[in-house]
Image: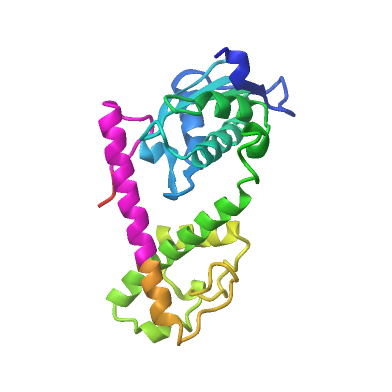
Amino acid sequence: MSAAATTGSRPGVSRGDHALPGDAGQRQLLTALDTVRDPELDEPVTALGFVTSCTLSGDGDAQVRLRLPTYFCAPNFAFLMVADAYDAVAAVPGVRRAEIVLEDHFASDVINDGVAARAGFVQTFDGEAVSELDSLRADFLRKAVMAGTDQVCRPLLAAGTLPAALVEMTLGEVPDSRPLQRLRERRAELGLPAGDEASLLIDPKTGAPVSTDALPLHLRKAQLTRTSLEANGSICRGMLRVRYDTRGQGEQEEQQ
C-alpha cells in the first residue's frame, strides 16, 4: 500500500507550528496515544503494547504503526483504535500529516484506507456494516463504569464501610484515587453525573442512583465486569507476547 493511501493532512494546522523531531517528537506522540484505548479492555494501546513504532519528522510528518494480538481481532474494535489514534496524533501541535498503519490484520488495508479518508465505519465496510460504532463504544464505556465502580468500592468495603452505606455516598465523599478519577472520566464520557454531588452508585445506562434493594446485584455485576476485563486483558497480553517477541513502545508491565 502506498503512503498516500494511509495518510491525511490535519485541517487547520498552521504552517508556522513546529514539530519536535526525534525522541522529543516520539514522546509527544506516545503521550497522545496514551489517550487511545482498546474499547473492550479500557486500557491505553500504549500500555497494552499495541504501538509498534511512532516517529515525527521536523516537517510535521507523523507515522504510527499499530499491531494487535491476533490476525482476526474484531474489525470494529480495530477500526475504533486506528481512528482514535489518527485523531489523537493529528491533534499534536506541529503535526502536519498523520499516518496510522495497522499491521498484520486481515482487514488492515480496508481499515487503513478508510481511516485515512475519514470515511467512517459504514462507508469503509460498504455493504457489510449497517451502522456506525457510537452505540458499541457506549456499551463498552458502560462496562468500564461498572468495572470502575468495583475498583472504587472494594477498598471502601475492605476498610469497613457497610455495603448499605455505599448507596448514600457521593463521589465527593470518596477518597481521591486514580480509579476514582477514571470512573469520573468514563461517566463524563457517557454524559452521566460525575461531579462531587453525584451518587457513587448509579445505573450506567440511565444514570439513576442504585436503590438499596438493587445494591447486592449491582455490586456483583460490578465485580464480575472488572474480573472479566482484567482476565481479557491478561489473555490479550499473553497472545501479543506469543505473536511478537518485542515490547511495544510505551508498553507497561501488567498490573497484578
Question: How many numbered tags mark residues here?
Answer: 0
Most extreme residue toward the front, as rendered? 127
Closer to the camera in the image, 52 or 19: 52
Position of residue 133 measured from the top left corner of the image (x, y, whole percent) = 60, 46
Residue 220 is inside the magenta segment? no
Q: Nearer the viewer, residue 64 or 106?
A: 106
Q: Quadrant of residue 66?
A: top left
Residue 252 can be seen, yes or no: yes
Instruction: Please state the extent of the stretch shown in magenta in the rendering.
Output: 224-253
Residue furthest top in the image: 2
Magenta stretch encompasses residue 229: yes
Image coordinates of residue 137 in percent, x first then y, are 56, 51
Residue 100 in which image quadrant: top right
Q: Is residue 93 visible?
A: no
Relative vertical location of residue 1 with respect to residue 163 in this rendering, above or below = above
Which residue lies at the image location 36% right of the left edge and 73% below the top edge?
A: 220
Could you say which quadrant of the image residue 61 lies in? top right
Residue, x 42% and y 49% (percent of image)? 41
Relative image position of residue 5 (x, y in whole percent)? 61, 18
Q: Residue at x 57, y 75 (%)?
A: 197
Compared with residue 151, is residue 95 higher up or lower down, i.e. above or below? above
**Residue 46 image position (x, y, % from top left):** 41, 37
Between 29 and 189, the residue placed more toward the observer is 189
Image quadrant in which the N terminus is located: top right
Instruction: Look at the image and name its color scheme.
Output: rainbow
Q: Main secondary structure of the magenta part?
A: helix
| Residue at the image point whose x is 30% and y is 27% from the top | 244
Rendered position, 20 above or below 147 = above
